[in-house]
Image: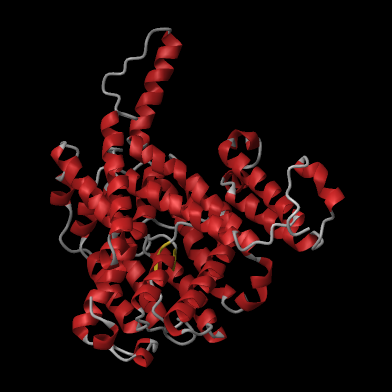
Amino acid sequence: MATGSSLGTPEQLRDPNYTPPLASAVPLGIQHVLAMFVSNVTPAIIIAGAAGFGFGSNSPDFPNLIYMIQMSMLFAGVATLFQTIGFGPVGARLPIVQGTSFAFIPIMIPLVAGKGVDAMGALMCGVIVGGLFHALLGTVIGRIRFALPPLVTGLVVTMIGLALVKVGIQYAAGGVPAMAKLTGALAAAKASGTPADMSGIEYGSLLNWGVALVVIVVTLGVKFFTRGIVSVAAVLIGLIVGYVVAYFLGMVNFDNVGRAAVFALPQPFHFGFEFSIAAIVGFCLMSFISAVETVGDVSGITKGGAGREATTEEIRGATFADGIGTFVSGLFGALPNTSFSQNVGLIAMTGVMSRTVVTIGALFLIAGGFFPKVGAVISTVPIEVLGGGVIVMFGMVVAAGVSMLSDVNWNRRNMVIFAISISVGLGLQLEPNALFFLPGTAKVLMTSGLLPAAFLAILLNLVLPEEIGHDQTEEVTGGMAGHKND
C-alpha cells in the first residue's frame, strides 16, 4: 500500500474532494469493497433462506436468491454514489460506503418466514415506504437525536446481534432445510414410538462443524496476526479458505453457475408490491435507529479522516441518501441500505478521506451487479462455510452494541430501563408463542423482540426521572446493584 507521502500531503489526504493518483486510488477503492463485501450480500442470503428459497432448499425459486445477491451489489454501489457524489440536498459528499443493512433482518424474518417468494412483495412494500420515511428523517434528525442516546442505540444493536447469532449457529450446523429433516425424523419417531431413522440426516454433523470452524479459526488468525488490507479482509479470506476445504470434501455444486446468465439488467418490481401495514410500521420504526447509526458513521468519518466534527449539512445529506438509496433498492427487489461502519474504521486506518476512492469502489460493486454469474458463484458457497463467517460477523454486532453501552452512565435509572427493555424484547424473541392470540400484524412486529425493546427503552428514557434513588431500585435489583454513580 502506498504511503501517505506518495498519496498526497496531509492536508490533501484530509480533503474529501482530493483525488489521489489513480494507481493508488484504485487499490484503495477495492480495499473498501473487500471490507464490506461479505456483510453486504449476507442479508439477502439470510432472508431468502428464511423465506424458503435459499441455500439447500432445492426450491424452483432459488434463482431469486442469485438475483437478490446481484441487486445487493448493484444498489450498494448506487447508494454509495448517492453519498459520495450526491445530487441536490441528497448525499454527504463524503467517503461513505453504503451496503445492505443487518439492522432490519429481525424485522424482515417474521414477515417472510416459510412463505416463499410470495411474501417478498410485502417485504418490498416495507423497504420502499420505509426508505421514503427514512429520507424524511433527514429534515428532523438533529432534533430527534436526544431521544436515542447510547443506552437506546446500544441496546438495539445488541438485540440485533442476539437475534442473528441463532442464524449463524443454524448455518454452521447445516442450514434450515437440514434442520427441518432432523426435526421431521424426530417427530416421526416420537409419533411411531420407534427409534429415529437418522440416515441422510446431516444437521449438526462433525463434518459441517469442522468446515465452519476452519472459517472461524482462519478468520481469527488473519485478523490478529496480519496487518493492512489482509487484516481488513479477514472474514473474506476465512470464507475463501473454508470454501476450498469444502470443495475438496465434495460440498460445492457449480450447477447454478452454468445456468446463470452472463449479463442481466435489474427488473423494476421484480417481486411485485403488496401493501402490508406490518412491513411499513416495522421498517419505519427501525429507520430511526438506522438514521442515528448513520449520524454516528458520518461523525466517525469526519473525526477519523479530517479531525473535525460533521456539519449539519453533511448529516442531513447522509440521512437523505440513506433513505433514497433504500427506496430505490426496494423498487428493484433489493433490501435496505445503510452506511457501513467497518469502512469508517478503514478510513481512519488509511488516513485517506478522498470520496473519489470510495466512488471507485462503488463502480466495482455496480459492475459486479450486472453480471448474474457473480451472484451464482457466491451462491455455491456451502451454508456451513457461510455459517462460520456469520458467527464471527453477528458476534461482532453484539460486541459493537456492548461497546456502545460502555458509554452509558450505569446509574440505577439506566439499569432499570435496560433490564426491562431487554427482558421483554429478548423474552418475546425466544418465546414467540406467548403472543399467539395477537392479531397478525401486531404479532409480526412484537415477535421480532427488537421493536418492543426499542420502544420500551425510548419511552422509559423519556418519562423516567433522571435520578431514581437507592431505596426505589434496591427492591428491583435484589440488592445486587452496585453503588457506582449513585
Between 414 and 4, the one nearer to me in the picture: 4
User: Quadrant of the rendered structure where residue 463 is?
Assistant: bottom right
Kindly identify the residue that appears in the image at 13 percent across and 50 percent down.
258
Residue 150 sits above or below residue 383 on the image: below
Task: Look at the image and tell me whether residue 142 can be seen.
Answer: yes
Kindly identify the residue that appears in the image at 63 percent across and 78 percent down.
142
- Residue 322 on image: x %, y %: 47, 72
Kindly identify the residue that appears in the image at 47 percent across and 81 percent down.
302
Q: Residue furthest top?
A: 193
Kindly identify the residue that appears in the image at 31 percent across and 63 percent down.
232
* Drawn side of residue 441 relative to residue 264, left or right: right
Q: Residue furthest right?
A: 471
* Drawn side of residue 179 relative to residue 23, left or right: right
- Residue 444 on image: x %, y %: 57, 45
Residue 240 sits above or below residue 200 on the image: below
* Drawn side of residue 439 relative to residue 325, left or right: right
* Drawn side of residue 32 relative to residue 188, left or right: left
Between 93 and 151, the one nearer to me in the picture: 151
User: Quadrant of the rendered structure where residue 140 is?
Assistant: bottom right
Position of the N terminus, as image quadrant, is: bottom left
Residue 465 sits above or below residue 85 on the image: above
User: Quadrant of the rendered structure where residue 281 is?
Assistant: bottom right
- Residue 388 on image: x %, y %: 33, 45
Task: Look at the image and tell me whether residue 279 can be seen.
Answer: no
- Residue 244 on image: x %, y %: 17, 46
Position of the C terminus, as image quadrant, is: bottom right
